[in-house]
Amino acid sequence: MYRHYSSAGGSRRLWLLMVAVLVSFGMIAAACGDDDDSDAAAPAATQTAAPEAPAATAAAQPPAMEEEMEPAPEEMADGSGATFVSTQFVPVEEAAKLRSILSPGGIDFTGAEAGPTIDQILAGAGAIDVLGALHGTFPPLANEDALTNMIDVLDDLSADRSFAPSFVESGLLGTDDFLAYVPWAQATYIMAANNQALDYLPEGADIDNLAWEDLATWCQAIMEGEGRALCGLPNAGLFHRFLEGYLWPSFTGGMVSEFRSNEAAEMLAWARDSLWPNINPESINYAFMQEPLLSGEVWVAFDHVARLIDAFSTEPETFVAFPTPSGPKGRGFMPVIVGLGIPADAPDPDEAAAVIEYLTRPEIQSQVLSDLAFFPVVEGVDTSSLPAGVALEAEAVEKLANAPDALPALLPVGLGERGGEINQIFRNAFDRVVFEGEDIASVLNAEGDALQALLNETGAPCWAPDPASDGPCVVNPAG
């Protein structure tokens, strides 16, 4: 039985959390590269993964709006004595912006790399009160009992704010009752559409609650009405995340364990026969979908929020942002989650809890969004003073994270420097079936074997949405 994480959300919030699936932008640099994504400037179909570009790049980052933000309420009268270490917002410009956000609360922070920080905590230095880091930093600490259970902290916070249930579940790391971190911020992937495309939506369809089959039908209607394929996917960009975090989880309920299941085979047949024939053929060359959206080559697209922001910011009246579709097993999506944890040997856990309370206030979450381009993890964040493009994305991200069928699929964990290999395996499966016309069962069996070998050689245990495992994650047989 799960804990009731939000006393303010009422029965609906409890119900959402009870049915949420257990699951284990900025500077994407997790310990040993476990949460690294692929380079934002280079095509992703390579054997070697490079760090994914920050969501808050110079081109995509919205301008600071400190002059428009109301002062943070309830400032800490004597300042905070907590030692706050963060592996995020470390570069000079981002660090200055975070300090500006923290200053009214009397809080400061120290930037650090994930690896040395993990080593320091595991060594029992007893010098850190609050740790802010990506999801992948927390499992090795939890495995060594080096973290405080954050359930009581979350219960206290939930008296006056509601956290996205899927991100709370992520902090459980596959357990029933040990919360490794309280969610702090997140980035993810969403959909974008030109307003002209809305005339072709399937009858009765809700753009905020589409199924993947609805998307294929919509794209077909656009092509038939306009005489050209106007839906696009970033095949030369982060397409492997589309496969790992969206199609496979939505159709199979897993990423790795159900890689070669019957449901995966049916999904690939659908992608080959219904989806890809209605996708702009130039998609094989698209790395950033904001460019074809702005040029009019594409009317409907999927991509990372950082790779859509220019379209929303340049022509906010032209485009709409909306959540990714759902499948038979749920609304698979890939969040990049930043959490706040308290080491087990923290010198002042009470001060640490006060820092976390400050950072998760809706008004502070809003300022992190406007200044640092990381999206909120709590409901009720005011987006009225955000740049128009960021506000469009923020609304879509909140709807996605709080969808009742949300199924978070985390970035691969435990593969270290070989993280690029899993991306290639997923791409190979798609390419061999959809582009080369190979037999689906044969392809899934062969690529599934390659995936299992990778997991065995790295010893990587399962990560969400797959159930936790004691040893290397297992790719189930077909069937």
Image (cartoon, rainbow, N blue to C red):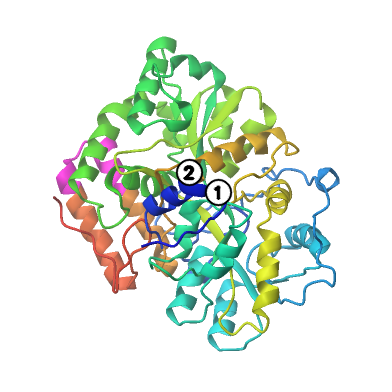
Q: Residue sitting at 64 percent across and 73 percent down?
A: 130
Q: Position of residue 242 (x, y in %)?
A: 41, 44
* Identity, as a three-letter code, of the amino acid under mark 2: Gly
Q: Is residue 431 magenta?
A: yes
Q: Is residue 340 above or below residue 289?
A: below
- Kindly report the secondary structure that dominates the magenta region of the rendered protein: helix
Q: Is residue 157 magenta?
A: no
For label 2, the SS is loop
Q: Is residue 470 above or below residue 206?
A: below
Which residue bears the numbered disc 2?
A: 237
Label number found at residue 40:
1
Between 235 and 102, the one lying in front of the other is: 102
Quarter location, residue 398: top right
Between 413 and 379, the one lying in front of the other is: 379
Magenta stretch, residue numbers: 428-443
Q: Position of residue 469 (x, y in %)?
A: 30, 69
The answer to whether 188 appears left or right of 94 in the picture is left
Q: Residues within 10 Å of mark 1 (few under 14, many from 20)?
A: many
Label number found at residue 460:
none
Q: Is residue 49 above or below residue 326?
A: below
The answer to whether 105 appears left or right of 343 in the picture is right
Q: Residues within 10 Å of mark 2 (few under 14, many from 20)?
A: many
Discs 1, 2 touching: Cβ within 8 Å: yes
Q: Position of residue 128 (x, y in %)?
A: 65, 80
For label 1, the SS is loop
**Disc nearer the start of the sequence (1/2):** 1
Q: Is residue 287 visible?
A: no
Q: Is residue 116 visible?
A: yes
